[in-house]
Amino acid sequence: MVPCVIFEDEHLLAVNKPAGWNTHAPSPYAGEGIYDWLKHREPRWASLAIIHRLDKETSGVLVFGKTPQANRSLTEQFALRRVRKTYLLLTDRTVPGKEFVVRSTLARTGDKYASRAGGELAETRFVPQAGKTAGSAAGLVLAAPLTGRTHQIRVQAAENGFPILGDTLYGGTPAKRVCLHAAEITLTHPVTQAPLQFSVPPNFDADARLALRRAVIEPEETNAFRLIHGASDGWPGWYVDKLGRYLLSQSEGPLTERQLAELARLAAEFVILGAYHKVLSRRVGTATKFEASPRLAWGEPAPGPVEILENGVRYELSFTEGYSIGLFLDQRDNRRRLLTGHVAAGFPLSGLQDPGSEILNVFAYTCGFSVCAAQAGARATSLDLSKKYLEWGRRNFALNSTRPPAADFIYGEAFDWLRRLTKKGRAYQVVVLDPPTFSKSKEHGVFRVEKDLAQLVSAALGLVKPGGVLFASANAANWPAEKLIGSVESALRAANRSIVARHYTPQPPDFPISPAEPAYLKTFWTRIE
């Protein structure tokens, strides 16, 4: 079970939404909200519906409907104000009175809301709580909204002299998060009519970045993920990954004292043995393996290759092999799609378990996608221009007790082998295209993903069975998702192949997207005839 889920039955799903995560994606190609991520994760959540919302910076209980009957019932209960919601907030200002009700009419004014004549009626009961919260000098206030207007509690608290701690949009004192939490929701079960109460206590002192990771990462299944993603997590230009019992830090310069202190804090939090640091360089093609490899910054060195677990699958990583450690963590959710046979709501990855099912993994690197497909039951062919990485891929297969005949390994240039395989009449249930952003080869010359993806897709289309799936991914921060999708679609039109199912996926939630840290990983899944 995903850690953020606090209740599920046939009709309802209740979760504890972490602060800093949208309820839903703000635009079609933005980062997924918790709703989008859940809806496309499991087949049983494909009909998930949003009944109410929480602001991005608000944590706490969020309830989704899973069936039409539940959606109708919950919508009616909210409309008739039969749902009771209780929030808790922190403020460092004086709260007037013991208990009071605020009624106002709210309207949007630029990027926020304010009381305005002609706006929508908003009503909230505020109850100051006795004492202080642990570790904080701020006062705790209960807020029970009787209506459900956008930013209602935030606006009314601010306009009555006690803005929420951290809510700088409405005049609150800066803090590490907006200290507003949906603590409890009470409703009637849509089928049994039994009263239901979902509650989660607040923890305003917790690290909001780690709370986000803990909401989505199943620790028994995955011990490798991103902990700090640059400016989105308040550390511009700095990236930190947890890799089993080790940390990998990356930035364009040496570690600062502040960064070293943060690494030590994270090491204590996750019982880490050692931390490595890599200085990011634009000389990737000319640096030696030693120069490109990360250096030990803290703790014990890894005794050799490190084994990590992701979605229950084992992979070998290394801190001494140069530029990359052996796995791109940002493709975790896409690897899971191959592993589970489920791309998205309404898009099953059917057929991988069928006898004779095959996938082709182009630019296979250490064969992460191939291992997952083989675990699902398919025969996986991995194509790469590096013998070293293909051998590494064989070790990944062996780690999971998945050996030939479940796998083939082809050493060679991608375009050349796509032509050869097409001439041989080979056809695959899934073709995975995850090319480098930039590369050179003797046969093809310079490859740039923005310029050459459509040509790559065209070269691969003859290998996709009718009804098969094409996966096209690019690591290109300055290339809009619409352009990637357009490149794939233009190649399909030129080949007279039509799309019968599609799904766009951004990078996973532990690689949060923000204006200061834009999206870079874009993936387009298509089923084609």
Image (cartoon, grey):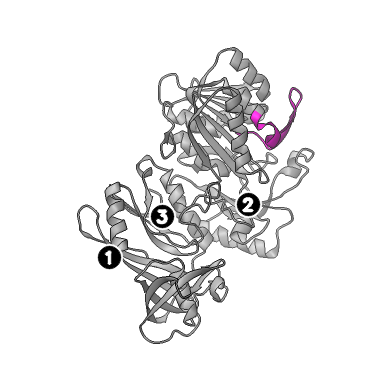
| Distance between the alpha carbons at the discs numbered 1 and 2 | 40 Å
What amino acid is found at the position of numbered circle 1 in the picture?
Arg
Task: Give the percent coordinates (x, y) of residue 381.
Answer: 55, 23
Q: Going from the N terminus, do you reach mark 1 or mark 2 first?
A: 1
Which mark is in front, 1 or 2? 1
Determine whether 69 is above or below 386 in the image.
below
Residue 383 can be seen, yes or no: no
Q: Residue at x 46, y 82 (%)?
A: 160
* SS type, badge 3: loop
What amino acid is found at the position of numbered circle 2 in the picture?
Pro
| Distance between the alpha carbons at the discs numbered 3 and 1 | 25 Å
Determine whether 219 is above or below 92 in the image.
above
Q: Give the residue pinned by disc 3.
A: 4
| Distance between the alpha carbons at the discs numbered 3 and 2 | 25 Å
Between residue 230 and residue 389, name the one nearer to us: 230
What segment carries the magenta color?
Answer: 434-454
Q: Are marks 3 and 1 in contact (CB under 8 Å)?
A: no
As drawn, is 280 to the left or to the right of 133? right
Task: Give the percent coordinates (x, y) of residue 418.
Answer: 62, 21
Which numbered tag is attached to residue 518? 2
Q: Is residue 444 magenta?
A: yes
Residue found at the far bottom of this picture:
97
Which numbered tag is attached to residue 2? none
Q: Quadrant of residue 74?
A: bottom left
* SS type, badge 2: loop
Q: Give the residue pinned by disc 1.
A: 82
Between residue 356 and residue 278, name the one nearer to us: 356
Between residue 178 and residue 395, name the one nearer to us: 178
Please rate how many residues cluster around mark 2, counting C-alpha atoms within 10 Å: few if below 14, some from 14 to 19, many from 20. some
Task: Give the percent coordinates (x, y) of residue 242.
Answer: 56, 51
As drawn, is 444 to the left or to the right of 141? right
Which mark is in front, 3 or 2? 2
